[in-house]
Image (cartoon, rainbow, N blue to C red):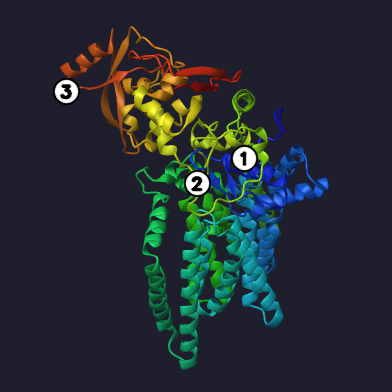
Amino acid sequence: MTTFGVNFQDTDSWYHMRAVHNLAAHFPHQSGFDPYAIYGGGQNAYTEPWDLFIAGIASLLAFGIPSPRLIDQVGAWLPAVLGALLPIPLFFLARRLFGVGPARWTAVVAAVIPGILVWATHLGVPDHHVAECLLSVCALVLLCGAVESEGRERLWRLVVSGLLFGIYLCVRPAGIFVPATLSLAALLEPLLAPYVATVLAIASAVFLSSSGNIWAEYTWLTLGCSITACLAAWALGALWRKRAWSKTLLLPAVGVAAGVAIGIVAGLEPALFHSMAETIRRYLPDGQGTSRSYLVGELAPLWEVTPGRLSSVFEVLGPVWLPAFPVLLCAFYAIWRSRRPALVLCSVWGLVMTVAGVIQLRMMIYGEPAIAVAAGVGCARLMAELPRFRTAVSIATAIFLLVAGIPHGIQHSITDGGPRADWHQAMAWLRWNTPEPMGDPRAWLGYWPALQPGKDFAYPPSAYSVLTWWDYGNWVNAIGHRIPSTNGTQANSDTVAAFLTAASPQAAQALGSQLHARYAVLNYELTSELWPTVVQWSNRNVARYQRTIMQTSPAGGRVPITVYLPDYYRTMAVRMYNFDGRAITASPQVSAFITTPVRDPSGAMLDALESEETFPSEEKALEFRLLHPDKSVVVGSINPMVSCVNVEGLPWVKPVFASSDPAGPHTVKIFELTR
């Protein structure tokens, strides 16, 4: 809790709590549309079991309509409570497949493993990550149990597993990798095919309630392909057993048949199939830093997590990966040689989710439980190899996991990822000092039915948007009760980025009119650490605005300095945030940095500062560069607040608010954009 109430920890958490507050106002009816989500059409809201769960518990505790404070408290506590339950289903999964010893170690590891699960399950993160993890793990446990059961027990396990997977897809409609992974296991072990097909069919029936969301078409396509592949594997597996044919030929036959079946399904919707493939490609790392995965922190590959490379593995997984990875490598043997279908299913799941977690950090929500099971098996195996020293080794291993892992977990759990006090100040000012865009402040909690297909929402003449970066769009909606120009979906982000990087006031005004922006909210990070991301979204090159040069320190090492180029000071973001839209006269001294290329220990080429010259104007500095074509010369300033070029004023930009932040240069500023 803060002086502003519960400070939810990321942008998606604020999205969910905005929906929960709206839902609680007319529980149990969920709005099918949110006009406040983003300007330019609003945003359809699909059936969200997670939001319904939070609002339902709050309503139950209040015996009716809960207070906003109670709703926030339930949203803050619920992920932590559910996260504490995760070791239980993992214990039962490991016990079924590997025995009691590995199950105990799995529960211990699951309780202490650091990384994204610690973040997703600590106080103040009411995003659906914990629900995704718990639902998928429980459904997997039940499916493995159904494969190894008989009669009514098998039936109820299949039904409940299908229901849980269906609810999972409602919570995470973009989770197409789950049916894909289950069908892959069925292709590798056709004995699994009838169970997987049954579970996916039940899940499809449950998913009908969420079929209107933006990812639904991809989910239906994946479900169709997965069920078709399972049916093909089921039929061929039955044929092979009946004919007593060699099992060696079964796998390639199933692969070909499944490929043909999937091809037929994809052929019925070729445009949708290619669209899904392109979307997946866009969010996979490409090694060049141009993929969307490099623009969103949780989508970045594991090796990009600070501090990088092998250290990143320790940062996310602590020491747990040491006993886990050898076991995961042995899973390949289990898949190929095992005569136990449930073990094949678990092995395929573990490998796929671990690899996915390495490729995309967000997928560690699924990868970490799989790694916990593998680590539990690895620790138990180590105890078995040293029976005479079992007690001592057990104690030493437990201490090692705790001592080496808990610091990372504590760091993740105490990190404050929510809006700072300056943002809360800015959003409070926005809420109480700007016109109500919908004409009535009660509209924020109003019930909004889903739009009919092909219908657009008609905003009243009073409506407008608040221009800000997509990271902060949900704050504008949830805290400020205003309509952002972009939000966590990243819709309109390219237009916002074009506005922020525009050098022409006329072009910026046209973009602002396109977004129907009346106010702009900017912060320090937009012109500093977030600037390369903004530039990339605008399809420009960051080298046009700033360069990094290595300067020799007094100790003899090299330290990086940032040189801001003339075009940096001409952008709307800098002219508004750094200079409040005023006309600026260039500094009487403009620097020209002469650099020479050097190679660092890793082999990368860097620009090292050789000397610095100063000139009375940009023109003189550029003239110097032209007169020395044999030298690498960078003209600019190392102070982002001191322009090296003259900048005209922006009479249509009016500063109306600046937060007071005694902790540092993190002021949030609000500007009114006049026309």
x then y, percent, for residue 114: 61, 47
For the point 71% across and 30% down, the residue is 2
Q: Nearer the viewer, mark 3 or mark 2?
A: 2
Where 394 sits versus 514, above or below? below
The amino acid at mark 2 is Asp
Q: Which of the labelled discs sits on residue 630, or is there none?
A: 3
The amino acid at mark 3 is Asp
Where 300 sits versus 550, above or below? below
Residue that mark 2 sits on: 456
Query: Are the residues at dot 1 and dot 2 in contact (C-beta closer than 8 Å)?
Result: no
Q: Nearer the viewer, mark 1 or mark 2?
A: 2
* Total residue callouts: 3
Residue that mark 1 sits on: 14
Q: On the picture, is 674 further left or further right than 634?
A: right
For the point 68% across and 62% down, the residue is 89
Mark found first going from the N terminus, 3 or 1: 1
Q: On the picture, is 595 further left or further right than 394?
A: left
Q: On the picture, is 393 further left or further right than 466?
A: right
The amino acid at mark 1 is Trp
Residue 27 visible in this rendered orientation of the protein: yes
Callout 3: SS:
loop
x then y, percent, for residue 138: 65, 63
Residue 475 or residue 625, whichever sits in front:
475
Residue 417 or residue 480, whichever sits in front:
480
Query: Are the residues at dot 3 and dot 2 in contact (C-beta closer than 8 Å)?
Result: no
